[in-house]
Amino acid sequence: MALKNKDVLGLRELSIEEIDEILNTAELMKHILTQNNKRTPHLQGKSIVTLFYENSTRTRLSFELASKYMGASAANVSASSSSVAKGETLIDTGRTIESMGADVIVIRHPMSGASHLLAKNVDASVINAGDGMNEHPTQALLDMYTIREKLGRLENVKVTIVGDIMHSRVARSNIWGLQKMGAEITLAGPSTLMPVEIEKMGVKICSNVEEAVEGADVVMGLRIQKERQHEGLIPSIREYADLFGIDKKKIELASPNVIIMHPGPVNRGIEMTSDVIDYTASTINEQVTNGVAIRMALLYLLTRRRVIEHDMY
Ligand code: CP
C-alpha cells in the first residue's frame, strides 16, 4: 500500500491503515539496522535534504543516517548558516532546494503550519520534523512503534503523558495517533501548561501525576520547553520538579509492566529523576534507535510513492 499524500505532515492526516503500513515497514527497517552491514539500495539515486530552522540532535541525525544507510544523497541546510539568514523566504528556500533535485525535504520550523506551507509550494515530498506547537509526526510514529514493540499492541494501552502539554507538538501528534490506534490517553501537568478545551480531543486530564500514573502501561515525560515558555507559567523549576517530575515513587503506582518514555532531550532531575531515566523499564535509548527505523520507512514509502506516480503518467 502506498501513502495517500506526497507529504507526511501530521498524525491528524494519516489513516489507521497508513500508520499500520509505516509501523510494519519500520519493523523491516529495524531488522536491517541490526545487521552488521546496514547498507541497502532502497533509496539509491534519491536526494534527501534536511532544512532545520531549530536545533536538533535526534531528528536531524536520524534522517541523515536513514538516508545514507539506504543509499541516498543527504544534505543539510541550517537556517543560521544559509541564505535564510539573509532574508530568503521559506517558499523560495524550498524551491531552491527542489531545483537542485531534492526528492524529499525534511523541515523543522518554529512556526506551526510551516511544513504545510512548504508542501503546497514544492513538488518534492515534505516531511514535518516539528512545526511550532503543532505536530512532530515522526516522533509520535517512533513512540507508537516502541509501545507496540514493547507491549505487543496499541489498542487499549493506557498512556499517561506528563508535563508541558501546551507547547508540546510531541503530545499533540501522540494524542492524534495513539487515539486512532485505540489507546487511552491521560494527561497531567500544571493547569497553566494545559491547553484550553484539550479534553475535547477525548483525553482524560488529571491535575496530579499520582492519579494520572495509576495503572498506566506507558508513562511519557515531556521536556520543559524553556524556549517556548513565557514568564510566569510555572512558579519555579524546582517546584515543577517536585510536583510534576517523574520519580520512582510515582512509577510504583503504574502497571507492573510499565514502560517509561521521553522524546528527548531530557532535562535530568526536572522532568524525570536520573534513576527513572536509567531504569530498566525506560525505553529512551530504544526510542532513538526506533527513530532511525521509522525515518527509513517514511523515506522509503514516500520515494516509492513518487516512483509509482511517475510510472503512471
Ligand atoms: N525528540 C526530538 O525531536 O529531539 P531533537 O530535538 O534532538 O531532534
Image: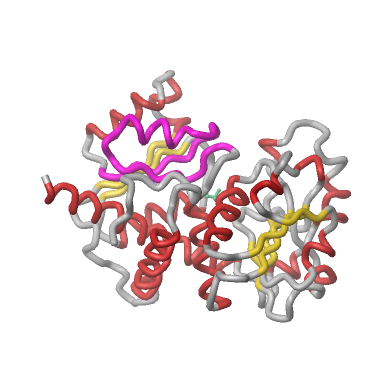
Residue 258 part of the magenta-drawn span: no
| Residue 207 appears in the picture as rendered | yes
Indicate the position of residue 201 as horizontal and vertical percent values. 64, 49
Indicate the position of residue 283 as horizontal and vertical percent values. 60, 70
| Residue 292 appears in the picture as rendered | no
At x 12%, y 51%, the residue is 311
Q: Quadrant of residue 275?
A: bottom right
Residue extending farthest bottom? 256
Indicate the position of residue 180 as horizontal and vertical percent values. 53, 59
Q: How many marks?
A: 0
Residue in the foreground of this view, choosing between 190 and 80: 190
Q: Quadrant of residue 150?
A: bottom right
Indicate the position of residue 286 as horizontal and vertical percent values. 54, 69
Which image quarter holds the N terminus? bottom left
Residue extending farthest top? 87
Query: Is 190 left, or right, of 267 in this rendering?
Result: right
Query: What's the magenta region?
Result: 103-132
At x 43%, y 52%, the residue is 14
Residue in the foreground of this view, choosing between 288 and 9: 9
Residue in the foreground of this view, choosing between 123 and 29: 123
The answer to whether residue 77 is above or below residue 274 is: above
Residue 125 part of the magenta-drawn span: yes
The answer to whether residue 114 is above or below residue 65 is: above
Which image quarter holds the C terminus? top left
At x 83%, y 41%, the residue is 234
Query: Is 166 left, or right, of 170 in this rendering?
Result: right
At x 76%, y 42%, the residue is 193
